[in-house]
Image (cartoon, rainbow, N blue to C red):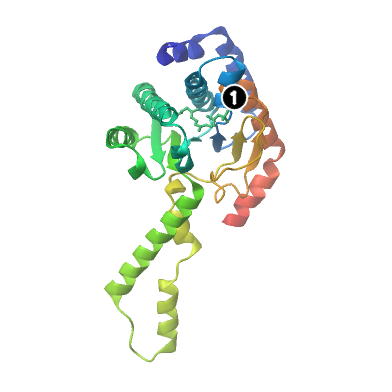
Amino acid sequence: MDKEYFLTKVLSCWSSFIRRVVFCVLRVGPIPTHIAVIMDGNRRYAKRKLLEEGAGHDAGAMALLKLIIYCYELGVKYITAYAFSIDNFRRKPSEVQKIMDLLKECMTVLAKIAKHHPIKVNFTGNLELLNAELRDEACKLMGATAEYSKFVVTICVCYCCTDDIVHSVEESCREKCYYHSYIGDSHDDDKDDDDKDDERHMINLVDIEKNMYMAVTPDPDILIRTSDKHRLSNFLQWQTCHSLLASFSTDWPEIGVWHLVKVVIDFQQNYDYFVRKRLQQL
Ligand SMILES: CC(C)=CCC/C(C)=C/CC/C(C)=C/COP(=O)(O)OP(=O)(O)O
């Protein structure tokens, strides 16, 4: 089905009126700033519905685009999706190609949405692993939407959190080595100066967090995973240590507005915890 046509329907149909009323009620309470999603169960959905395998990913991409619209309407500021992990390169070439094609299609749809709505789109992960054409498209879309800040969509491609941590430590070391070679060793005998110098060469939490691919967003308030799986699968394990984890038995293509409503209510019921954690981080 044509994704643009379908999305127009999502925005204009009768159910959108009910959705807006429900969202108005939700907005009486606090709304999460950032929701992250692991989109699991696309192949199982296709199998269950007796569709060809790729149709599951097609339906999954559509479900993501719909959820992006719902989050935008609700007033969530950031949504982050795990679209393709580095490990996913081990899948059948035809499946990898299918996801890459969908990524390109999603870029086109997001670019069109961004023409009418202030949506910033990030692609994050080891983008060097993408083919050159796709990487250029991703960079173009990031450049074209870089000015916006009202709503930020982050698509994690060629992403794994362990890779993000390693990349960040390498970057931090490079920065500190640069500082070290630029400033040079202090050769005076003053111990206090030496101690200060040592501190400046040490990598700390601020360096690591600043250099992570995911530094483009704050940590998620909520992480949703579908298809009855309760693992993080190397997605944002650094960033989700205080997040609310929501696992649904639904396969990803069937995720809908009521799942979003449920996680927001859970968030509101646990809001005191988030406020306390944020105050501790100040
Ligand atoms: C933005 C963008 C490109 C979206 C692409 C579509 C999409 C939903 C990608 C998810 C990729 C993925 C490997 C999901 C895991 O489900 P699975 O395929 O492993 O299914 P299973 O858990 O049933 O095996």
Q: Tell me which corner region of the image, top left, top right, bottom left or bottom right, holds residue 128.
A: top left
Closer to us: 49 or 120: 49
Q: Is residue 118 visible?
A: no
- 159 displayed left or right of 174: right
Label 1 element class: helix
Query: Where in the figure is residue 177, as x and y percent of width and height?
Result: 34, 69
Circle 1: residue type: Arg
Q: Position of residue 269 (x, y in %)?
A: 72, 36
Q: Looking at the picture, does residue 185 appear above or below residue 102?
A: below
Residue 270 showing in the rendered view = yes
The picture quadrant where one finds residue 136 is top left
Q: Is mark 1 within 8 Å of ligand 1?
A: yes
Quarter of the rendering occupied by the N terminus: top left
Determine the image quadrant of residue 124: top left
Residue sitting farthest toward the right: 269
Does residue 191 lie above or below 11 as drawn?
below
Q: Where is residue 156 in the image (x, y as percent from the top left)?
A: 45, 39
Q: Residue tagged by mark 1? A: 44
Foreground residue, 259 or 49?
A: 49
Residue at 48 percent across and 42 percent down: it is: 87
- Total marks drawn? 1
Q: From what the image shows, is residue 93 above or below residue 185?
A: above
